[in-house]
Amino acid sequence: MKMDVLLGLQWGDEGKGKIVDVLSPDYDIIARFQGGPNAGHSLEFGDFKHVLHTIPSGIFRENTQNVIGNGVVIDPIIFKQEIDKIREIRPEALKHLFISKKAHLILPSHKTLDAASEKAKGQTKIGSTLKGIGPTYMDKTGRNGLRVGDILRPDFSEKYDFLKGKHLQLLRQYDFDMPEVQNEKAWFEGIECLKEFELIDGEYFINNAIAADKKILAEGAQGTLLDIEYGSYPYVTSSNTVSSGACTGLGVAPTNVGKVFGIFKSYCTRVGSGPFPTELFDNDGEFLQSKGHEFGATTGRKRRCGWLDLPSLKYSIMLNGVTDLIMTKSDVLSGLDKFKVATSYIIEGENIDTVPYTYEGEIKPVFKEFIGWKEDITKIKSYLELPVELKQYVEYIEKETGVPVNIVSVGPDRDETIVRI
Ligand code: GDP
Ligand code: IMO
Ligand code: MG
């Protein structure tokens, strides 16, 4: 059976974790395909709340296998922390976790390099999560990286020392108050923790599952507008967050991709630096931030908030070949008298409805206004019962994008989800 893909269409934090958890009973395998612990995917059911960073969001479903694919970068320290936490609350959940031998390892010195690079950038810093993501992917493409499979080799610690030595040399180039490379002990404990799991040839694992008619859902991290190629470069992450990243990040041919679920919030958020055409600096922005509890799940930073940006959404849908849209955080708009959507931008006096090469300079969004609704919608279970104003909004997005909105999420809990098909 073809592999489905689920990914974010904005700047991350669209609610991927929640929706993967909702969909996972329909799948045999959930496979993360890129990113690393810069991600924070929140799951909620009843009193249970959990944030995952490296581990796929199907982990709390009894019959689902979870794969960390080759496109992912793993910090053994954070990985062990995640494992220890799950072991405490649901040890049985870990029975079905598999890790690709080709996934790359984040070293403590990658994190130091990340911090040094951000400091050197000063005002133009990316606003990285400082998890070592950029430097690790640089070593991967520079053909210097350490991979999970290497931990089984007798010369692993020499390889580690060699790469660390290279990093220490690089760090001398920076005006950076360099601490001793820290947490090495914890890092090697993390390596031992990785060894407790089945390390797999992920591309064979996934392709054999496809051949055996298993249902697979590839889980993305970050969002399309943070993609290394197509995002608001250089204010992006260092991996391909788009659907083609699921092919390279898991070893699946494009001909074996089925549905592409694209998730977006009913408004936009962004954490970290970089352009954000519809960003709000007024009461509406504060309303979205506080009602939506818009704080980063990984860093705790306040998320910047703004209205939905249709040119960007259409761009993301195009890049990913989205077949099904999922709108989250619809409930957050409840209570607003009016809300808006950007339909195009004015750039240097010209009205354009595509995403420009760079978002530099003044971009003035052109807004369409919608009438809001007052009622709480979090307990509503069917699409038909939603306020007419929300349905009009959903149907406007469908008309504009040409893609059906098949899931409307009305709260953070698993149960607060309206599936239309
Ligand atoms: P991810 O990175 O895409 O998995 O998203 P995050 O977990 O970082 O951020 C999404 C946040 O919104 C989390 O706190 C979720 O619990 C929450 N959330 C997801 N869907 C909804 C929704 O429909 N309504 C509300 N109010 N919260 C939601
Ligand atoms: P999930 O999977 C939101 C942002 C950072 C920064 C930029 C680069 O939870 O949606 P990096 O650490 O990759 O060097 O940071 O990307 N960023 C995210 N923003 N959600 C994420 O992941 C993010 N991962 C990275 O804030 O602006
Ligand atoms: Mg997140």
Image: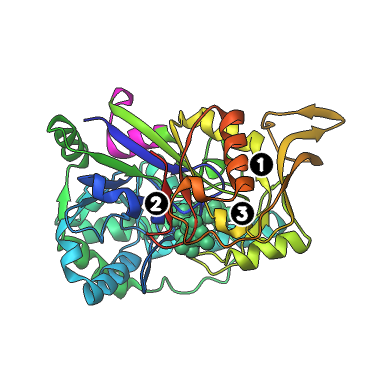
Of residues 343 and 93, the one nearer the viewer is 343
| Residue at 58%, 43% in the rendered image | 391
Q: Amino acid at mark 1?
A: Asp
Q: Amino acid at mark 3?
A: Thr
Q: Which residues are magenta?
A: 244-255
The kind of secondary structure element at disc 1 is: strand
> Which residue was labeled with disc 3?
269
- Look at the image and tell me whether residue 142 can be seen: no
What x and y, as percent, mark residue 173?
A: 56, 58
| Residue at 39%, 42% in the rendered image | 6
Location of residue 205 (image quadrant):
top left
> Which residue was labeled with disc 1?
309
Tell me the CA gap for discs 3 and 1: 10 Å
Specify the principal SS of the magenta part. Answer: helix
> Which residue was labeled with disc 2?
19
Q: Residue 334 has which mark? A: none
Of marks 2 and 3, which one's residue comes earlier in the chain? 2
Tell me the CA gap for discs 2 and 3: 18 Å
Tell me the CA gap for discs 2 and 1: 21 Å
- Residue 78 among those drawn in magenta: no
Cβ at disc 1 under 8 Å from ligand 2: no
Of marks 2 and 1, which one's residue comes earlier in the chain? 2
Cβ at disc 2 under 8 Å from ligand 1: yes
The kind of secondary structure element at disc 2 is: helix
**Mark 2–mark 3 contact, CB under 8 Å?**
no
| Residue at 79%, 61% in the rendered image | 282
Of residues 193 and 295, the one nearer the viewer is 295
Few, some or many residues within 10 Å of mark 2 (<14, 14–19, 20+): many
Of residues 388 and 278, the one nearer the viewer is 388
Q: Which residue occupies the extreme top position in the image?
A: 255
